[in-house]
Amino acid sequence: MTEARGDNWIQKNHHAIESLAFTAFIIGVYFILPLLHISVPQIPEFAFMAIGVILGVTAWKHGEVNKIIAQGQKGVEDGNK
């Protein structure tokens, strides 16, 4: 959980970077290669599943961290009353 709250920009934005890279990959393979008359390679289904799992887990983990941060801030606000 420390990773998601890190001070490093790549730690904070790794989910967005992974999502953009995956989108660029899909566009490149299924749109750009055919436009260049290059055959589309056969990509195993497990490769797409692995990327989906990585994106899903990082999104879930980010949400969990946000909940913990929100609970901590609520506790601080309640303590100040």
Image (spheres, rainbow, N blue to C red):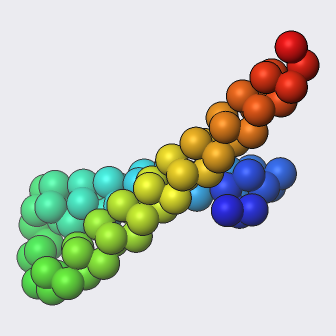
User: Residue at horizontal 25%, vertical 81%?
Assistant: 47
In the displayed structure, does residue 33 sit left or right of residue 74?
left
In the rendered structure, the answer to whether residue 24 lies left or right of residue 43 reads right
Q: How far from the left and from the top, in percent, is residue 53? A: 33, 70
Res. 51 image quadrant: bottom left
Q: Is 75 rendered above or below residue 66?
A: above
Quadrant position of residue 11:
bottom right
From this view, report whether residue 72 is shown above or below residue 36: above
Residue found 67% across the figure and 56% down from its top: 4
Q: Residue at x 78, y 55 (%)?
A: 6
x, y (%) of residue 62? Answer: 54, 52
Q: Position of residue 50 (x, y in %)?
A: 30, 78
Q: Is residue 45 visible?
A: yes
Left or right: where 28 falls relative to 34: right
Direction from residue 30 to residue 57 in the image, left or right? right
Q: Is residue 17 visible?
A: no
Quadrant of the frame with the C terminus? top right
3 and 22: which is toward the camera:
3
Q: Residue 78 versus residue 65: which sits nearer the camera?
A: 78
Residue 35: x percent and y percent?
Answer: 13, 56
Q: Quadrant of the N terminus?
A: bottom right
Count every numbered label the image shows and give the total: 0
At x 75%, y 62%, the residue is: 2
Residue in front for this viewpoint, 55 or 21: 55
